[in-house]
Image (cartoon, rainbow, N blue to C red):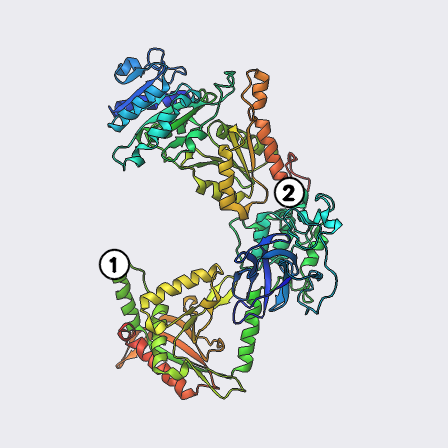
């Protein structure tokens, strides 16, 4: 018997949630088969089997979390002897050595049991093996399974009202109304809208539905409060940014650049790109490259603090720039690798693809890790300027405001010109004020002489 | 717009295409002097003469082959198989020649041939003359198969079929010839391979073609009236190519589907539609796809048994109710009137 453990699927992952079991107890598993879909802090990922056998038991149900390394299922490879069952749902507790006897199942038709055939297993199937025929599998329609995945619902308290006890969409209507995070637009069907938005369910299934959403102590009538489950993504944002704000001594340096030349260059470039049938570039694409060039000039900004116990600071030779994206599920930072070696057009194409992947939650861990610097741009919302929290283990993040026309002193007169404000948040443990100022000086010089960005 | 019968729409379209293009000509059994077993070609022999409206011997394989040859040399023959049952005598010509020539010979010759033929039972014509075997042709790459259910589509798809450069099996239906509907006066060909949502709805997708698309529209209208159900109807119109996109996008919206067909259930057209739904909309289904088809018997001659064997409006209604019940939808008739206060 082999224990399948919760894998570490990304650097920042500490626990994972079982999204969907793709194999059920009794299913034959070949090497390379997808066993389970696991939701990490960044994406939903498929986890493949490294060993062949028969899936004996699922230890962590769909929708439940488990720490890295915790057993989530047992795979029978026919090799070793007894394996004990652990009560489902307690999988996050550490497992001690199990000595209980095996849970003997009457082998169903699809179950291969190479163990010595005792009288019990020699009985013709069809007797007491209703279990093997699927009562262990919670029957739900494909639509329900999809909605459960997308909305992180827990079906364990839902009673199916469809034929044969199938859980149908109508059975989770209340769960969807109460459990859908507000911005999570799911399907075109908008089930939450289709279901009557009642808070006092009339169906008998209601009490168990209510129990599925943990009652928050804050819930009260005065504030019209309701509880929504915290998604993995939100949980990881909370943990990592709290740690960053708490542990990193941030300081902030703001500069303003004359962006008239940058806007003129972009307009000229885009007119010609459009004529050539190529994709247009954005101010952000130009800024990604400008930052990459400024980092190349100031490699001491492209560093990571080694930790209080460490005797070294990590200086990164590669310049990998993260771009903060406001995805529906929450903030995510895809990373463009070797941004200093790519053209603005390449950077734009790559950024666009990453944003699309982020919105579909299809970024791989490789695409969200390895960053050395981050840009967060709220200019499109008309923000003048703001400060950002550093994305560890990076040491600096640039918060970019809107490019707006302002009265500007030119010679002795005033002239309307484009201006752009940005603020660099810096980790004072590794970067001092003068270095941060010099970095911004270089960046501002590039923005004001934008041909240097594309040269 | 003019209101006319399905039969009249076919007749008028054949005539207008013959006037438009001298290469269009008709061949078939009893289509000239007798004016066609179902009178689609009435008056055309007199108007166009024997060269363009040719009566043939009772020899389907022979005149199908002659038409293929004519088509290869640039004419646009429209042949009539008196019913689809007789087309089996020409299977070799249609499947091994018409459908193959363009691809097998590197595109040297195309076969712009239209095979008009009615299918369908319900006329007490017995087991051998009441079949729905359009599947034989829809199965074969190189063929196109269209199946209009309304007079307007009879016209639009006939225009498209005649002007198409590939062999097209044009499926008519004995039970539809006398149905009436609005037909546009302009000659606008349909796009072959495009299904139509003929009635938008959100509760369930009802899919049919030919006579069963007609039945689908009637049942959907009747259930809207009696039960307040909002059923979406998809008329396939084309069996090859099959418009999977329209089918899938409808089921993604409604989460449930019932597929109607006049042919037999096992291996039928509905099986292909159901498989397409499984491929494209699995995650959107709240209940299994249900099919309504003819009983798995050779069609009986007895009127009572024939009626029982064919899928009826009641069968369709029952399948809809079962499917809706499986997704938790109450289908009892709605109470009329507004509750007090």
Q: Could you tell whether A181 is left or right of B137 in the image?
A: right
- Residue B43 location, quadrant: top left
Residue A202 visible at all: no
Q: Could you tell whether A352 is left or right of A166 in the image?
A: left
Residue labelled with disc 1? A276
Q: Is residue A285 above or below residue A435?
A: above
Q: Position of residue B31 (x, y in %)?
A: 35, 15
Residue A27 visible at all: yes
Q: Position of residue B143 (x, y in %)?
A: 37, 32
Identity of the residue drawn at 27% across and 18% down: B52
Q: Position of residue A125 (x, y in %)?
A: 70, 44
Quadrant in which the C terminus of chain B is drawn: top right
Q: Nearer the viewer, residue A449 or A88?
A: A88
Q: Mark 1 to mark 2: distance in Å?
A: 55 Å
Identity of the residue drawn at 25% across and 58% down: A275
Q: Disc 1 on helix, strand or loop?
A: loop
Q: Given contact means CB atoms under 8 Å apart, are the residues at marks 1 and 2 in contact?
A: no
Q: Disc 2 on helix, strand or loop?
A: loop
């Amino acid at each position: 018997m082999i224990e399948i453990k919760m894998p570490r699927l990304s650097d920042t992952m500490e626990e994972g949630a079982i999204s969907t079991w793709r194999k059920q107890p009794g299913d034959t598993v070949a090497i390379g088969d997808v066993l389970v879909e696991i939701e990490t802090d960044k994406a939903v990922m498929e986890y493949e089997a490294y060993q062949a056998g028969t899936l004996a038991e699922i230890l962590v149900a769909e929708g439940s979390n488990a720490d890295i390394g915790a057993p989530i299922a047992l795979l029978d490879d026919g090799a070793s002897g007894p394996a004990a069952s652990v009560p489902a749902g307690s999988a996050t507790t550490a497992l001690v050595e199990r000595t209980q006897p095996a849970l003997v199942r009457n082998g169903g038709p699809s179950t291969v049991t190479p163990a010595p055939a005792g009288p019990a297993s020699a009985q013709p199937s069809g007797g007491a093996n209703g279990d093997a025929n699927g009562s262990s599998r919670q029957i739900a329609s494909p639509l329900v399974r999809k909605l459960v995945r997308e909305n992180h619902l827990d079906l364990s308290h839902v009673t199916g009202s469809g034929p044969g006890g199938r859980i149908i969409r109508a059975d989770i209507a209340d769960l969807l109304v109460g459990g859908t995070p507000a911005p999570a637009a799911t399907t075109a069907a908008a089930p939450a809208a289709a279901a009557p938005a009642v808070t006092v369910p009339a169906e008998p299934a209601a009490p168990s539905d209510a129990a599925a959403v943990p009652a928050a102590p804050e819930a009260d009538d005065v504030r019209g409060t309701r509880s929504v489950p915290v998604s993995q993504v939100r949980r990881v944002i909370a943990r990592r940014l709290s740690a960053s704000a708490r542990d990193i001594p941030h300081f902030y340096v703001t500069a303003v650049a004359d962006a008239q030349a940058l806007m003129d260059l972009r307009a000229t470039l885009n007119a010609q790109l459009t004529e050539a049938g190529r994709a247009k570039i954005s101010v952000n694409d130009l800024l990604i490259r400008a930052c990459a060039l400024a980092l190349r000039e100031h490699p001491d900004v492209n560093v990571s603090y080694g930790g209080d116990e460490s005797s070294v600071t990590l200086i990164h030779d590669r310049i990998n720039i993260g771009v903060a994206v406001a995805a529906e599920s929450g903030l995510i930072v895809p990373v463009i690798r070797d941004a200093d070696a790519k053209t603005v057009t390449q950077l734009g194409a790559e950024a666009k693809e990453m944003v699309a992947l982020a919105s579909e939650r299809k970024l791989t861990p490789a695409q969200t890790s390895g960053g050395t610097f981050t840009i967060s741009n709220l200019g499109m919302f008309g923000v003048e300027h703001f400060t950002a929290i550093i994305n560890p283990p990076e040491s600096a993040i640039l918060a970019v405001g809107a490019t707006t026309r302002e009265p500007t002193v030119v010679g002795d007169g005033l002239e309307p010109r484009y201006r752009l404000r940005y603020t660099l948040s810096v980790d004072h443990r590794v970067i001092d004020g003068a270095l941060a100022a010099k970095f911004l000086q270089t960046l501002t010089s590039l923005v004001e002489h934008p041909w240097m960005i594309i040269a | 717009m003019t209101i006319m019968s399905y039969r009249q729409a076919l007749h008028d379209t054949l005539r207008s295409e013959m006037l438009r293009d001298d290469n269009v000509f008709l061949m078939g059994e009893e289509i000239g002097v007798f004016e066609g077993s179902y009178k689609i070609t009435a008056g055309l022999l007199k108007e166009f003469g024997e060269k363009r409206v040719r009566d043939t011997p009772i020899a389907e394989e022979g005149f199908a082959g002659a038409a293929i040859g004519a088509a290869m040399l640039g004419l646009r023959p429209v042949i009539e198989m008196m019913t689809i049952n007789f087309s089996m005598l020409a299977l070799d010509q249609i499947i091994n020649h018409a459908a193959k020539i363009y691809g097998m010979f590197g595109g040297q010759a195309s076969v712009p041939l239209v095979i008009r033929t009615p299918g369908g039972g319900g006329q007490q014509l017995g087991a051998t003359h009441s079949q729905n075997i359009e599947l034989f042709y829809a199965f074969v790459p190189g063929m196109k198969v269209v199946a209009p259910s309304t007079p307007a589509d009879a016209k639009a798809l006939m225009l498209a079929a005649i002007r198409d450069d590939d062999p097209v099996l044009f499926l008519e239906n004995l039970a539809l010839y006398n149905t009436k509907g609005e037909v546009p006066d302009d000659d606008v060909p349909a796009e072959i391979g495009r299904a139509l949502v003929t009635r938008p709805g959100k509760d369930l997708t009802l899919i049919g073609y030919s006579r069963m698309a007609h039945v689908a529209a009637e049942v959907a209208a009747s259930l809207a009236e009696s039960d307040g159900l909002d059923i979406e109807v998809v008329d396939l119109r084309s069996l090859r190519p099959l418009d999977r996109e329209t089918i899938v996008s409808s089921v993604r919206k409604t989460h449930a589907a019932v597929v109607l067909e006049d042919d037999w259930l096992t291996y039928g057209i509905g099986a292909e539609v159901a498989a397409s739904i499984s491929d494209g909309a699995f995650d959107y289904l709240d209940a299994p796809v249900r099919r309504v088809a003819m009983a798995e018997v050779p069609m009986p001659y007895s009127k009572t048994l024939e009626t029982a064997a064919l899928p009826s409006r009641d069968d369709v209604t029952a399948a809809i109710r079962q499917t809706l019940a499986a997704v938790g939808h109450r289908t009892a008739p709605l109470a009329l009137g507004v509750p007090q206060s």
